[in-house]
Amino acid sequence: MIYVLNTEINSAIPLSIALTNIYGIGYIKSKKICKNLGFSIYFKTKYLSPKNIRNILKTIDNLGYVINTDLKKQKNLQMLKLINIKSFKGLRKLRGLPVRGQRTHTNSKTAKKINFKY
């Protein structure tokens, strides 16, 4: 197992899929990272050297991707901003109700589980 940005990456799968385990990096971004480094999308993670891992970290930084805890903080601050300005979306999120206009009479069980109260 390899650790990149405090995320455990499986060494048996291709690099383009393994990078998607990092919070904030999807398949499209991982393909772009592989392309910038000159790796095939089928390149196995177990063949990475420490130098390659450093290059991956530099590439992620150079491309300006917001990932892991920074992304979580940013999303949380956006939600707190919506709550502070008392927007409809923020108030619905605050009460733990569906945000995007779904029915609440019978079907809001999932939203009540997901939308925790701030």
Image (cartoon, grey):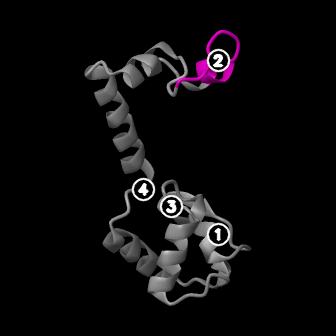
Residue 60 position in % (x across, y down): 40, 70
- The residue lying at 68 percent from left, 67 percent from top is 10
The answer to whether the residues at label 4 and label 3 have Cβ atoms under 8 Å apart is yes
* Disc number for residue 17: 1
Q: Which mark is residue 49?
A: none
Residue stretch rendered in magenta on the structure: 101-113
Residue drawn at (36%, 49%), measured in percent from left and top?
Answer: 70
Three-letter code for the amino acid on which mark 2 is drawn: Ser
Which residue does the numbered mark 3 point to in the structure image? 25
- Spatial CA span between label 4 and label 2: 31 Å
Residue 11: quadrant of the picture: bottom right
Q: Earlier in the sequence, mark 4 or mark 2?
A: 4
Instruction: From the viewer's perspective, tell me whether residue 34 is left or right of residue 91.
Output: right
Q: Nearer the viewer, mark 4 or mark 2?
A: 2
Residue 99 seen in the current view: yes
Marks 4 and 1, how far apart in space? 16 Å
Residue under circle 2? 108
Q: Which residue is mark 4?
A: 67
Mark earlier in primary sequence (2, 1): 1
Q: Secondary structure at mark 4?
A: loop
The three-letter amino acid code for the residue at tag 4 is Ile
What is the secondary structure assignment of the residue under circle 3?
Answer: loop
Q: Position of residue 58 (x, y in %)?
A: 36, 75
Quarter in which the C terminus is drawn: top left
**Neighbours of disc 4 within 10 Å: few (<14), some (14-19), many (20+):** some
Q: Give the amino acid type for the residue marked by disc 3 in the picture.
A: Ile
Residue 51 place in picture, x, y as percent: 46, 84
